[in-house]
Image (cartoon, rainbow, N blue to C red):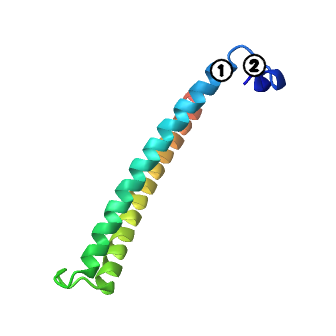
């Protein structure tokens, strides 16, 4: 037990830093476990839907359609973000031009 301390003496604050890191790691682990659980639940629900014969005609084609719809939504979001960035860039350029013109007036 004292062998560790004899080999690597602890500086003041090392124990506290290690405890903080351990707490952060534990929180991250819990978050990842929760995310994993959610993903597994979604996966299981989709698997059941695909396996059920009464799944409303769910087939590989329907899965592909759902994937395509998700991709379209992602692309729409990207377009909106791009428009926002362009608008912001235009405002910044306009402000820069106004600032440059003020000394000329």
Quarter of the image with the C terminus in it: top right
The local secondary structure at tag 2 comes to loop
> Where is residue 53 shown, x and y percent of the image?
20, 85
Name above or below for residue 18 compared with residue 48.
Answer: above
Query: Badge 2 is on which residue?
Result: 10
Separation of marks 2 and 1 at Cα, in angstroms: 7 Å
Quick check: marks 2 and 1 in contact, CB under 8 Å? yes
Q: Most extreme residue toward the right, as rendered? A: 7
Q: Residue placed at 43% from the left, 44% from the top?
A: 31
Left or right: 67 in relation to 9: left
Q: Residue placed at 59% from the left, 34% from the top?
A: 100
Pick the residue in front: 69 or 17.
17
> Where is residue 25 shown, x and y percent of the image?
55, 37
Q: Quadrant of residue 96?
A: top right
Q: Quadrant of residue 20?
A: top right
Q: Quadrant of residue 16?
A: top right
Q: Which dot marks residue 15?
A: 1
Left or right: 8 in relation to 13: right
> Where is residue 75 shown, x and y percent of the image?
41, 66
Name above or below for residue 35 compared with residue 100.
Answer: below
Q: Residue placed at 30% from the left, 71% from the top?
A: 46
Query: Disc 2 or 1, which lies upstream in sequence?
Result: 2
Left or right: 40 in relation to 51: right
Q: Residue placed at 32% from the left, 61% from the top?
A: 41
């Amino acid at each position: 037990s004292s062998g560790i301390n004899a080999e690597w003496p602890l500086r003041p604050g090392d124990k506290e830093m290690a405890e903080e890191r351990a707490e952060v790691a534990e929180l991250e682990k819990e978050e990842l476990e929760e995310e994993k659980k959610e993903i597994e639940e979604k996966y299981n629900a989709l698997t059941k839907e695909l396996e059920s014969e009464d799944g409303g005609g769910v087939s590989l084609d329907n899965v592909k359609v759902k994937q395509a719809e998700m991709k379209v939504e992602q692309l729409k979001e990207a377009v909106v973000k791009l428009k926002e960035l362009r608008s912001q860039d235009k405002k910044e350029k306009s402000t820069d031009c106004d600032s440059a013109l003020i000394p000329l007036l």
